Amino acid sequence: MYNQLKINYLVLFLAFISGAFSACKNAGESPASAPPANEANAPDHFGDEAPFWSELLTSATSFNERDLLDAVPKSPVSDIRKAWESQKQTAGFDPQKFVTDHFDLPASSGFMPDTTRNIAEHIAALWPLWTRPAAEDAGTFIGLPYPYVVRTASERTLYYADSYFTMLGLQAAGKTELLEQMVRNFAALIDRFGYVPTGNRTYYLGQSGPPYFALMVDLLAETKGDEVYAEFLPQLEKEYAFWMAGMETLSPTNRLVRRLVRLGDGTVLNRYWSPYTTPREWHYRADVQMVTAQAAARPAGDIYRDLRAMTEAGWGYSSRWFKDGVHRETTHTTEILPVDLNALLYHLETTLANTWRAAGDAEKGTVYDQRAEQRRKAVLGYLYHGPAGFFIDLDFPNGEPTYVPTLAGLFPLFFEMVPKEYALAVVQNVEEDFVRPGGLVLTPHYTKEAFDSPNGAAAWHWLTLRSLRNYGYDELADKIESYWLTHLRKAYAESHRLTDWYNVQTLEPGIGAYPHADGYAPTAAVFLKLIEQ
């Protein structure tokens, strides 16, 4: 009953478990790329049961990998494995039924929308369903000391890349205590691991997310005062140290160290990266299938590292990451210097400068001011593409832009890093290439991927609208905001749902990655923040 593909899965999975989270390095990368102690292992709960888990993940295809990884065993896994071994060869064996017999799977919320509610009332009814209590470590779950807000009512996982946008809604809704608890949860993760994992699951350890923590502290400071910066200074410093780890080992002959890239003139910028060269557990089947299908076109470890780095970016499959602009197997995230990441680190550097200065240490403040200015000049010099009039990621091995404009190119305007003449060119490109009847597309490139046309998402509307207003382009911002909110209201009237993705070209109701969710917290939160203003 197990064909060659399943044998391939098993071989790869065993290799993954035995060496999964040892220090695997790309060719040409420094040994300093090895993960530090705090970049902890992904799930060790497989242990001696690795062959069983491999067969389970590849056989119980009615369940996605996340649900299987997060499922709670009803008895010791060793006993479940013995039951599997004794039953799997019997006639009529059903892996799906086996899973439901032996594991408690994540339950749906059971939420039924009231179709008489408007959007704001719908969101108000969902906040309690999105809120989870503090919890301790259990299975793959990494415990959190305070209540927290998830993306959908059926989840338990706190995701870093989405939470800043959810917190905008907490601020708009006056939920200050919960906003502060979210900040404290992320601070606790930084204290424990030295960084914020992609999500609070053991299988996400090794990857972080775009460094939004300073922006989260900004939100809290707007409510509680600037003294919160001093309180969270240790965590701001630790997150910065994570992204800059290995800086002292960079040299003209050692130009790639972890998340750092030294360019030919000595300029240093950051990239998304992972210390691991193994399939992503939460996308295990698809990752292995991709490597199996592309044979030896690229080393498997390189593909897996690039996919993990893409996860860290918080921006999924897209022409943004594809070397050929089309195919997933050409994802080359670790060869790209992203605009958004470097702008976020600029903001972290300026936040550290201001916080140290306020604490009375002018010398440290000056050090971070200098680092921020160096990065600002590097972003202008390397990530602004003059002929396109836009900030575009750099394909650093080729020394050329990727030629894929994305809304991530607005981040330098979001943080007011650029002169007005740069902003003018960027804004003209937004109006010409990104605006659609229902809002903004993430990229002008049409593909089958969620992070390309014709799709739009709430978070990137918020970032773009604030960027435009920072430079006085209120008329265009008002038009885009009207398009987006009108589209959202129309889609809600038809479906009584708020989703993660919307087709902003055809104005169809959103489907998104969570088709059974009645609300997606970041979408709802940005809606509240926009109507508040």
Image (cartoon, helix red, strand yellow):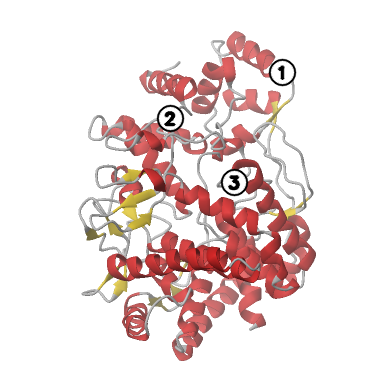
Q: Name the amino acid, label 2.
A: Ala
Tell me if residue 171 comes above or below residue 204 in the rendering.
below
Q: In the structure shown, which secondary structural element does the residue marked by tag 1 occupy? A: loop
Q: How many C-alpha atoms fall within 10 Å of the one at disc 1: few (<14), some, or many (≥20)? A: few
* Residue at which label 3 appears: 199
Tell me if residue 428 comes above or below residue 526 in the rendering.
below
Residue 67 appears at what percent x and percent y? 61, 37
In the displayed structure image, the side of residue 259 where residue 92 appears, left or right: right
* Residue at which label 2 appears: 23
Q: Name the amino acid, label 1.
A: Pro
* Residue at which label 1 appears: 76
Identified at 58% across, 14% down, the residue is 48
Residue 424 appears at what percent x and percent y? 34, 85
Q: CA distance from mark 1 to mark 3?
A: 26 Å
Q: CA distance from mark 2 to mark 1?
A: 31 Å
Identified at 28% across, 32% down, the residue is 299
Residue 259 appears at what percent x and percent y? 41, 47
In the displayed structure image, the side of residue 268 where residue 154 appears, left or right: right
Identified at 46% across, 82% down, the residue is 468
